[in-house]
Amino acid sequence: MAIEVRIPTILRSHTGGAKVVEGAGDTLSDLFADLDSRYPGLRGRLITEDGALHRFVNVYVNDEDVRFTGALETKLSDGDSVTVLPAVAGGASVG
Amino acid sequence: MLTLDQSIHDAIVAHARRDHPDEACGIVAGPAGSEQAVRHVPMENAERSTTFYRFDSMEQLRVWRELDDRDEDPVVIYHSHTATEAYPSRTDISLAMEPNAHYVLVSTRDPETAEFRSFRITDGEVVEEPVRIAGVDQHAVQTYMFGQTPTSVVYDCPAGN
């Protein structure tokens, strides 16, 4: 089953420059594992060593922020569209 | 060098003043691959904090879709520091994810004079760049001194260029 995944500029070095790639999986976690088999290193930019979604990466499934839909356990179906955007964040605080 | 229209510069400073003491943030979009920052989009600071900012994730998705549809890039990504200088903090540097963007910082710590500075942030390295403000009259060009005494803005009116 095909799921369209939109890749932000900063991660396109992992996809040979491709802006949109296709993957498969029943959950977001499966999808990232599938993508990593073809685009090595991509998963490591999205998921921490503890296996959680990076705090400063936004992932959306069909316009919904996955933080509110089960994070990496979010269920996927054929034809879903996944968008990855690095959060735009910062500030004067140190740390 | 970042070139900005006077009206966009003023709108960014006004946004920073309006949200003070919280940090304000936003972008200036322009045609993809160009260096033209022409469309100001103020963004919500989802953190509503005096020391931190983060674009609201749903607003960011909407705005980034719009950029895609219009074939635009976020040419400028700006935010304010409300009690410290207009220089990228360690947090700013570690979270900078757009190597092609001009990162503009505005400091509103002085109620009279806003500091307005621009940086490239790539792989943890910060390089300041000059900011050129183009007025309505294209011949009246002001150049901000940069990297100098942060509490004063020095205007320089070049005759030749």
Image: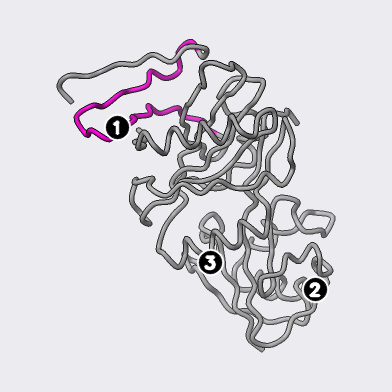
Residue B80 location, x and y as percent? 60, 31
SS at mark 2 in the image: loop
In which image quadrant can residue B108 be found? top right
Tag 3 and tag 1, C-beta contact below 8 Å: no
SS at mark 1 in the image: loop
Give the CA separation, mark 3 to mark 1. 42 Å
Q: Residue A82, relative to residue B89: is it above or below?
A: below
Image disc number at residue B135:
1
Q: Is residue B130 magenta?
A: yes
Image disc number at residue A15:
3
Q: Which residues are magenta?
A: B125-149
| Residue designated by label 2 | A74
Give the CA separation, mark 1 to mark 2. 50 Å
Image quarter where the N terminus of chain B lies is top left
Question: The numbered mark 2 sits on a residue in which chain?
Answer: A
Bin the neighbour count of mark 1 within 10 Å (Cα to Cα): few under 14, some 14-19, many 20 and up: some
View extreme (left): residue: B160
Seen at 45% across and 27% down, the residue is: B128
Give the CA separation, mark 2 to mark 3. 23 Å
